Amino acid sequence: MEYGTQFARPEERGERVILDVRDLLKQFDQSDEVITAVNRVTMKVYEGEFIAIVGASGSGKSTLLHLLAGLDRPNAGSIFIRGQDITAMNPDELGAFRGDYIGMVFQSHNLIPQFTALENILIPTMMRNKSELSYEENLRKLVASLGIADRLHHLPSELSGGQQQRVAIARALINLPHIVFADEPTGNLDRANADEVLDLLLETKRMIGQTLIMVTHDMTIANRADRIFTMEDGRLTLTKGHH
Amino acid sequence: MLFKYLRQTKFFRWLGMMFRSIGAVFYPRNMKNAFKSVLFSAKEYLCFFVALFVLQAGFVTFSLMTDTNLAHAEATIRAEYTHHAEVVGMNQEQKVNLQNILKLKLDLLDDYLAGASFYEESPGVWVAKITLNEGKSLETGLSHVKNTMLSTISQEGWILRTTPLYDFQSDYATPYTWTYVGLILLWFVLSVAVLWVLYRIRVNHFKFIYGMYMACGAGFSKLYGTAGGELFAISCLTVIPAVLAGGGLTAGLYMADGVAFSVSLRTVIGLLLFNLATILTAVYLPMRRMAVKTPVTLMRSLDNGSLVVSPSRSFRMFGAGFPHKYELFGMWRLRKYYAGLVLSAVLFAALFVSGLYISGLEKYHDELDPYEYTIRYGTLKPEIEEEELELETDENGEEILPPPDLTDADIEMIFGDLELFLDEVMKVPGVSYVDWKVATRGSSMQSHLLLKPGMLAGGTDSLLTSKERSDDGYTHAMNEYSYTAFDKTYIDMLTEHGLCTFEGDPYRLLTEENAVIVSEDVFNNKCYHFAPGDKIMVAVCDTPGPVELTFDAKDLLRQQIETFDFHYEEYTVCAVMRGRTSQQNITFGVSVENYTELAKTLPVRDRLLVYMKDGTDYDTVRAAEGSIRRAISVCSGWIVEPSGHYFKTHIDGMKQDHAMILALSIFILTVSPLVWFFAQLMYYRKRNTEYNILLALGAPEHSFGKLHRIAGGVLSGVAFLMTAVLSYLCNFVVHLLLNTLLPKFGLIENVAYPFEMSVPALLSCFAVSVICGFLSCELPYRLWKSGRKKVGGRISVNG
């Protein structure tokens, strides 16, 4: 897949919904109580948007993100990505869908320790079994823009925190996903690195035409989003931007 | 001042640290925490429970078997013998005199004498049975009897002999105890190795937690105390089941022979000490290695990152397949871990094969017939100052008294004596066969052999290259052989009693000129390869030259080749002899005529060994002595001496050593699956996050089954190969030790036992390795899959 072949930039396409969440509910059974982490959340996200979800610790924002990325199953409600209901998919269909359309950046990068930076970046390509020609160009541009070209043959244990996070970002983007979910990607970084990582995400978003949904507790980062949602006690409210 | 200085030394500081650390193990709060930890997380410690149970049960088995063997030996000896010494071969006058003095001493309540009785072995030949006071030293008692009683009778004709009751301590108690000590030490080393391997795996998995402990101030003492406490707690919980298992196993092994097992205090105390020593030793190294690391190094190890060998290049992942190439790439990166896993796990399986070999050797040894009587020609008194002489030993470890000085007439007479009494000796009830060996070292005759390269099998460093007949293909010279006289009687004895096998026709030696029967082994190790029809050149010295004094046979040969004049005679191999216990020389068996020519003397058959039939009762065996003495009395100068081997072999045969070794080998085999599953369960647990990442990146859930099966297949294949290699190596090393090296240095009896690998053992080994290699990957997958179901398919990747 090449840059933006399937989706034009938002301003060219008009406001097209890429993510449609309806009445999402997620509860956890603890020993003697039920905790509602996501309480009937409804939202729409348009193509090419940068959405920030903020909230206090324990508000349920990471749980919401995991539901949206298909990493967890809700107790009720539905999630449509590109018009497809991911809550109705079986695990293999969901896995394939994630591989094709979703990129995930975790807070603690979660690189696989026995593989080098380059190998970690290329792992998603193994899931989709595309030919190497599809990825070499993507890879070259990604590593150049992320500034990790000279660290590709190092193990994660040999990289700094910032470098590890860049590798994780490259891994999330190598398949040119349509929508990128980032769970506090700058949470473990200092200010300078955090700004740099955000700039890189936004730059690649601009290049590829992706939608970026980010959970963060950093308002400096959140303020750069097109819209900000606030999560509080499992409920989502729009605090910046329009519906 | 000295103490102050010593305290500063490294060793004393280490000693002090160890005292503190061992104290930390038994600190009440530590013990309490250890028990709590072990009981609440029993599943995590499961492999240690199994390992300690196996190791303790093994120790108990050893100990109980030794106690039982000793008790049984003593009971058997006491059932057969009530006296400690015998005076054999007295005439009437001597008997009367001795009877009088013994009666007097008994009436006077002699401190050392407890009783005496007499019986007439044959008309006019009397035997006195002397019982010593067991409350006193038997050695002093016997010396007292010799000096104050036996010295009062005339000294000709009689012999004083001790019985197994007297020799119980030296022939049974002490050797059994030393064997016990040796086995316990070996078991201790194995036990430490097992616990060390398992604890290393555990430590590697919990590095993060240990790092946290150290960050909070724990040092070596605390870490050691925690580790030692945990294992000690586990050992306390497994000790009773282990004792029951070991006791049950021992009882079962002896029940078939109707022997009741017995327990000594040594077993109880020994088990406690063994436990402590094993645990405290096994945890020392892992904790020591960890204590010198920085906490942060340990705390970084949340995943399997520490197992990875750092690459210089990346794999070409483009277009690579998931999960096949992914897993193979990963296995290559973690090759250090996998190599260590396979090596540790397979080594215990390989030791099982060696254990079975040792068990087979032990069984073979128990079934061997040792000789019971020696018929010697000589006028030497049996009670010579043997410590002044360095005596050679035969295959059974018995010292060979030096031959008396014989004239040519003596030799000729002795040569004919065998034909006069051999048949009568063979007719004595209970006698199976009579063996003898007449051999002269080739090196002592300034002789050597020339061999062709195809006759060399390796395994000896006694060969020199030779140019003498190199044009004819004889390129090597050696002198590690003995001229041995073979006649029809000897060949008949060897073949009729199955004492060896022959390739070829040995009887051709009697009819063909310059025919030879050869063996191939040196110290039971095949060093040469002969076949019927082979030609061997024998060097006969014409003119000796000057040589420097040397005790090295090879050096002597080198000097002889350089300075002596030889002519060479060709001999043809008519048969190759296999299966006899060998010493440092191969047999070069020639006819009596050739022997006389080569050794410059008639064969002196002055030492004969009489073997009894298996199953003969002790009374018949004892009575055979008198019968043999009567049979050989037709020729003057011969004496017969009992060895006591028959009785000892019977008692040793009840020891069930081979069954014990077999049982312990099976114990060792159980360690192999422990290592496989413990290591792999820990390893795959640490891959949970990796699997969740892969799922998050789109890996289909069903592909993880394939991933595990690929790993299982590779591990099974590697384990199969390693099993073959390690089993062979371990078995070979054991064979070398037990058949060659240890007998060479006189540390154990020399028993010719072929190198072999038990097929059932090998197959079991392969099965365990291959199955465990595969299942150790499959089981974690099943557990992961059921875990996925429990969390409803949720993917959790928060580190």
Image (tube, coloured by chain):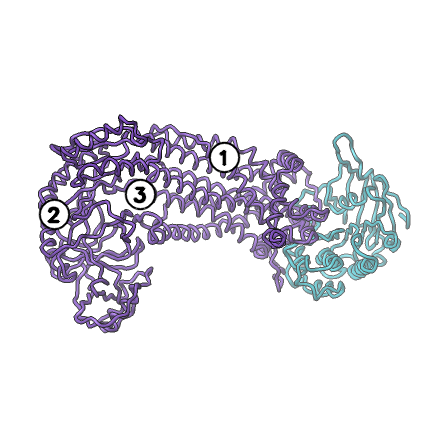
Chain colours: A cyan, B purple
Cα–Cα span, label 2 and label 1: 56 Å
Q: Residues within 10 Å of mark 3 (few under 14, many from 20)?
A: many
The residue indicated by pointer 3 is: B365
Q: Earlier in the sequence, mark 2 or mark 1?
A: 1
Label 1: state its secondary structure. Answer: helix
Chain under callout 1: B
Kindly indicate whether the residue at mark 1 contacts the one at mark 2 (C-beta within 8 angstroms). no
Residue A225, percent from left and from top: 86, 54
Q: Quadrant of residue B140?
A: top left
| Image coords of residue B14 (percent x, y) | 60, 50
Q: Nearer the viewer, mark 3 or mark 2?
A: 2
The residue positioned 40% from the left and 33% from the top of the image is B67
Is the C-beta separation of discs 3 and 1 under 8 Å? no
* Alpha carbon distance from label 3 to label 2: 29 Å
Q: Looking at the picture, do discs 3 and 1 lie on one chain?
A: yes
- Amino acid type at image mark 1: Ile
Front disc: 3 or 1: 1
The numbered disc on residue B269 is 1
- Share a chain, discs 2 and 1? yes
Q: Position of residue A94 (x, y in %)?
A: 69, 46
Callout 3 amino acid: His
The disc label shown at residue B418, or none: 2
Nearer the N terminus, badge 3 or badge 2? 3
Q: Taking the image as drawn, is residue A238 in sight?
A: yes
Observer-nearest residue: A149 or A92?
Answer: A149
Instruction: Assess whether mark 2 and mark 3 are in contact (beta carbons under 8 angstroms).
Output: no
